[in-house]
Amino acid sequence: MKTTHRVLLADREAADRKAIRRLMEAESGLRVCGEVSSCEQLFRALRTLRPDLLLLDLTVGGEAGAEFIREIRRQVEDVLVLVLTEREESLFAESALRAGANGYVMKSEASKLLPVAVRSVLAGNVFVSSAVQQAIFNRLRGMEQEQGTGAVRRSVGGRTIKPRSRRAKARS
């Protein structure tokens, strides 16, 4: 018998919850067991509905971000948390993963990646899109591409420095 995984949707926007619900209900073996739009509703639903997976837009927790994920983990240890957000910055993704999220997907990529991300997280993997992976990798390496020039900058001791030009290197 095939297992049905219970999914809880947490997003302030009703239209987003509706779109996510449609995506989840199109997948076999997944059932949306509830929807919430506030922090209070979320914690109540986590205790009463006992979902396997929480699809979480961090705006439900206000500005708390990573601390919000940690609190979810403290209260309900066994729920898998897949962050679904509009925040593209690698810092948000990295802090969400460090706080205990099992995955991070941009809403702009949801129609294409969400079913894959959900299956991956339910299988015990961590999922982040290739764009977010690259952003995290670049940040961890301390490198950024300068817009338009292709010159690489490196972050050292909290400062960003540009490589010296060939002429400057020749003079030294």
Image (spheres, rainbow, N blue to C red):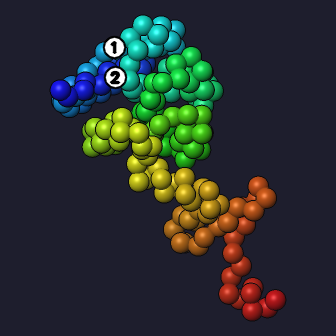
Query: Horizontal and vertical percent for residue 37?
Result: 43, 14
Element at label 1 = strand
- Residue drawn at x 38%, y 19% is 51
- Residue drawn at x 35%, y 15% is 35
Task: Looking at the picture, tell me which residue is in the foreground, 109 or 124.
Answer: 124
Element at label 2 = strand
Vertical side of 134 occupied by 37: above or below: above
Is residue 15 shown to the viewer in this render?
no
Q: Residues within 10 Å of mark 1 (few under 14, many from 20)?
A: some
Vertical side of 14 occupied by 103: above or below: below
Task: Looking at the picture, tell me which residue is in the foreground, 113 or 49.
Answer: 49
Query: Horizontal and vertical percent for residue 31?
Result: 25, 21
Asked where in the image residue 140 lies, by quadrant, the reply is bottom right
Q: Which residue is mark 1?
A: 34
- Residue drawn at x 76%, y 55% is 158
Label pair 1/2, CB-CB below 8 angstroms: no
Q: Which residue is mark 2?
A: 7
Q: Could you tell me the amino acid type at mark 1? A: Gly
- For the residues labelled 1 and 2, the Cα–Cα distance comes to 7 Å
Asked where in the image residue 119 lies, by quadrant, the reply is top left
